[in-house]
Image: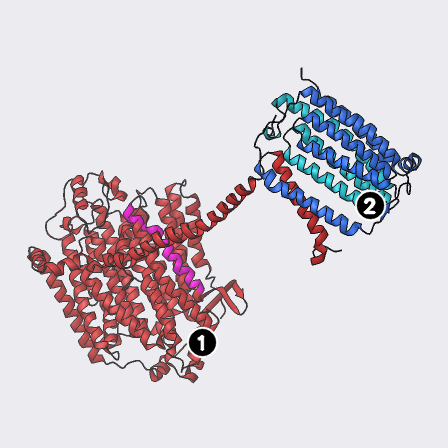
Chain colours: A cyan, B blue, C red
Amino acid sequence: MVPISWYLVLSAILFSIGVAAFLIKRNIITVFMSIELMLNAVNLTFVAFAHQWHQVSGQIFVFFVMVVAAAEAAVGLAIIIAVFRARSTLNVDQIDLMKL
Amino acid sequence: MNLGLFIVFGALCVAGALNLLFQRHPINSALSLIVVMSSLAVLYLLLGAEFLAAAQVIVYSGAIMVLFTFVIMLLNAGKEERTHGSKMAYIAGIPGAAALLALLAFIFISRGGSFGSARLGEYIVTTTDLSRVLFKNLLLPFEVTSVLILIAILGAVALARKEH
Amino acid sequence: MTTDLHLWIIPLVPLAGFLVNGLFGRKAPKPIVTAVALIGALIPMLMVSAILFRFSSLTLPYIQHIGTWISAGSFHADFAFQLDQLTLVMLCVVTGVGFLIHVYSVGYMAEEDGYWRFFAYMNLFLFFMLTLVLAENFLLMFVGWEGVGLASYLLIGFYYTRDSAANAGKKAFIVNRIGDFGFLLAMFLLISHFGTLSFSIIFTQVTLHPALEGGFLTAIALFLVLGAVGKSAQIPLYVWLPDAMEGPTPVSALIHAATMVTAGVYMIARTHVIFDRSPVALATVAIIGTATAFFAATVGMVQTDIKRVLAYSTVSQLGYMFLACGVAAYTAGIFHLVTHAFFKALLFLAAGAVIHSLSGEQDMRVMGGLRKKIPITFWTMTAAVFAISGFPPLAGFVSKDEILYQAFIAPGPGKLLWAIGLLTAGLTSFYMFRLWYMTFFGESRALPHEEEIAAAVHARRDTKIALEDDPHPGHAAHGSHGHGIHESPWIMLWPLIILAILSVIGGWMGWPEGLGGGNWFAHFLEPAVKAAHLPYEQAAVALSTGALSTGAINGANTAPAGSKQIEIILAIISTLVALAGWYAAHLMYYSRPELPDRMASSLRAGYATLKNKYWVDEIYGAVVVAPILFIARWVLNALIDRGVIDGGTLAVGYTAQGFGALVARIQSGNIRSYAGWLALFAALVLGTMYFGWAVHWIPR
C-alpha cells in the first residue's frame, strides 16, 4: 500500500540529484550519465501515473523514452569520443570553444 | 510487503544516485548508475509494468550502461581534476536544483495526496496489452523509432570513426 | 476691354535665358551666350513698350491670374500678376535700364572666364525683379524679394576665388535676411488680420474702413519698414552695400543702384494704403531716410575708391526716396527712383569704363587727367554728376527738389527734415564734384608699373580689394595691353550716351507745377498711390470706376497745401547749395590741392571717424556678430549639438553596448554555467506555472 505520491516524490528526488550531478561533475561522461539519471526519474513518474489512471499510454511513453535515450546515448558517446580526439581532455570546463 | 519492497529499493535508488554524485572516478559513477537502474526496474514491477521492467534491465542496464563503461575504458578516463570552471553553476545552479526539488515535492505532496495508493497486482499491463496499443494505434511512431535507431547507428559510426 | 497682355511672359523670358545659359553656357560659344542673354533682356523691354502703347485703353488695376498656388483652408495665395501705373513705371525702369546694362556688360565682361555665368545670373536677377514688381500678392512679391537677394549674392560673389568677394556676398545675403525676417512677420500679421495676402483684397479692406488706423497696422507697417531697410540699404542695415562693390561694375549699376535696392521704396509705395494709416510708421520712414542720407553723404566725402563713393551715394539717395515716402509724397519718391536709376546707373557704368580704361585701377588717388584721354566717358559722366548734384534743368534737380519741397510743407518736423536734406544735397554735390575732379582733371597721378599699383593697393586698407599678385582679376588680360589708357569700345559707350541723355531730359516729365510745368509724371502715377485718404463714399466710387479724377482727390484729401512761391524759393536755395558744393570741391581738388591734406591733419579725429565709416562695421562685429558667433560655437555647437544631441544619441548607443556586454557574459561557453542558469529558470517557470493561477497570470 504505497501511496502514489511517494513514487512521485522519489522521482523528484532522483531528478534533482541528476541536476545537481550535472552541475557539479566535471567529467563529461559523468555529466552524460546524470542526464540518463534524469530521464529515468521521469520514466518512473510516467509509470506511476500510468498505474494511477489505469492507462497504458504512460508506459508507451516510457517505451519511447527508452528508445530515444538509447539512440541519444550512442550518438552522444560518439561525439564525446570525437571531442576527446580533438581536445585530449574530458574536462567540461576546458571544452568551451565552438570550433574543434 | 509492497511497502517494504518499495522502501528498500527506493532507498537503493537514492543511495546509488548519491553515490554517482559523490564518486570521483567515472567508472564508480557508472556502476552506481547500474544499481539505480536495476532498482528502478523493481519499482516498475511493483507498479505493474512487466514489460518495462524487463526492458529497463535489458536496454538500460544491459546495453546503455555497458556502452558507457566501454567508453570510459576506451578513453581511459581518470579521476576527476579539481578545476574551477564556473562559479555561476554553483551560484545559480544549486539554488535552482534545490528550488526544483522543493517545488516538485510540494506539488506532488499537496496535490498527489488525493491519488491514493498503489496496490500490488491492482493494475498489471501485460506485454500483450502493450503491444496491442503499440502495433495497432502507434504503428507509425514505432516504425519511425526504428528509423531513428538506424540513423543513430550511422551517426555514431560516422562520428567515432578514426580520421585517416 | 479685356485684352490679354500675357504678363507672364515678361518674367519668364529671362528665366528661360537663365536656364539656357546656366545649363549650356559653359560649353557654348560666346556669341550664343550673348544672344541668349540679350534676348532675355530685350523681349521684356519690348513687351513693356507694347503695354505702354496700350496703356490708356486698359482698366486698372489689371490683374492676371496664372494659377492657384496655395489653397489651405480659408487661405489662398495665387500666382497672379497685376499691372497699374506704379507697376508700369517700375517695369520701364527695370527692363529699360536692365537692357542697357546687359548691352554694356557684353563689352565689359568680354574677357572674363565666367562670362556665361555672369549673364545667367543677370537674367535670373531680371526674372526675380520682374516677379517682384508684377506680383499681385505679398507672397509672390516675397518670392521676387528673396530671389533678387539670391541673385545679388551670386553676382557680388562673382569673383568667388577672392575671399573678400565671397565674404561680401555672404554679408549682403545675411543682412538682407534680417530685413526679410521683418517682411515675413508683416506677412504673418497680414494673414492673421486679413486672412489673405492679396494686395487688392487687403487694400480694399483697409480703404473701406476709414476709421482703421494705428495698432496692428502700425505693427505691420513697421515690419515692412524693416524689410525695406534691409533691401534698400538704410540705417541700420546698409552695411552690405559698400562691400557689394566687390562685384563687377555692371552688377553694381543694375542691382545696387537702379533696381534691387529700389525694391524697398517700391514696396512702401505699393503698400502705401497701410502706411497712410500709421503716422508712426511714416515718421519712422522719414527719419530713417533723412538720417541715412546725411550719414552716408558724410562717409562718402572721404572715400578714395571710386565705386565706394558711388555706393555711399546710392545709400544717401535711397535715403531721399525714403524721406519722400515718409512724408507721404509717394510720387516724388518714385520719381526720384526713376531719375536716380538713370544717373546712378550711368555713374556706375562710366566708372566702370574708367576702371576698364585704367586696366583695373579703382583708387581715385592715382587717377587724374583723364579728361582728354577718354572724352566720351568724361562727358557722359559729367552729365550724371551735374544731374545728381541737383543742377537745373537736369533730372536730379527736378526729383530731389520735389522731395525737399514736399518735406518742407509736410506737417510736424518737416522743416527740420528739409534742412538736413538740403545740407545733404550740398554734401552730395561736394563729393560728386570731388570725384569728378580727382578722376578727370589735373595731372595724371597714375603709376606706370603694375607691380607698384598692386603694392600700393595692398597698402591701402580702405579699398578692401584683396588683390593677390595681379591687379583686378577681371582685367588681367587688359594689363598686358600695353597701349596705355584708351576709350572703351562702342558697345560700352552707347548705353552711357543713352543714359546721359535720359539724365538730362528725364526730369522734364515731372517738371513741377510750381515752376511752370505740368508735372505729367505725378498725375500719371497718382491713381496708384493716392486712394487712401478718401472718405467712404468716394472710396467706393473710386474703386468701382478703377480710375480717379484728380479733382475729386484734391478736394477731399488731406495732403498738405503748398504754394508756388515757396516752391520757387526752395528751388533757388537748393541750386545755390549745389553751386556751393561745386565751389568747395573746385577749391579743394582743383585750384588748391594741398587743402584736403591740411584739413585732414587739423581735423584728425573727425577725419578718422569718417574715413573708418564711423566704425559701424567694427561695432556690428563686436556687438552683434561676436556674441552670435560665440553662442553658435560654444553654446549651440559644443554644448547642444555635440553635448546634448550627439551625446544623447551616443548615450543610447553606449547603453545598448554596455547592456549587451553585460548580457553577453552569460554566454561563457561553459556548459555548467548554462546548466546552472537552466536549472534556475526552469524552477522559476515551474513556479510561475503552478502558482501563477493564484494571481491570475495563468488561467487555471
**Which residue is located at x 82 percent, y 34 percent?**
B41
Q: Quadrant of residue C395?
A: bottom left
Question: Given the image, what chain letter belongs to the residue carrying mark 1?
Answer: C
Question: Most extreme residue toward the top, as rendered?
Answer: B164
Numbered badge on residue A4: 2
SS state under label 2:
helix
Give the image location of residue C487, x and y in percent. Answer: 21, 47
Looking at the picture, which amino acid does disc 2 mark? Ile
- State whether discs 2 and 1 lie on one chain: no
Q: Specify whether C331 is left or right of A96.
A: left
Give the image location of residue C130, x and y in percent. Answer: 40, 60
Q: Depth check: C153 or C487 in front?
A: C153
**Which residue is located at x 69 percent, y 44 percent?**
B100
Residue C148: within the magenta? Answer: yes
Relative to C120, residue C29 above or below:
above
SS state under label 1:
helix
Q: How many marks?
A: 2
Q: Depth check: C27 or B140 in front?
A: B140
The residue under label 1 is: C204
Q: Main secondary structure of the magenta part?
A: helix
Task: Judge whether residue C59 can be spotted in this image.
Answer: no
Crowding near the residue tagged with mark 1, few <14, some 14–19, many ≥20 C-alpha atoms within 10 Å: some
Residue C186: within the magenta? Answer: no
Query: Is the residue under label 1 in contact with that under label 2 (CB below 8 Å)?
Result: no
Q: CA distance from mark 2 to mark 1?
A: 101 Å
Q: Depth check: C303 or C12 in front?
A: C303
Where are the magenta residues, as a range?
C139-166
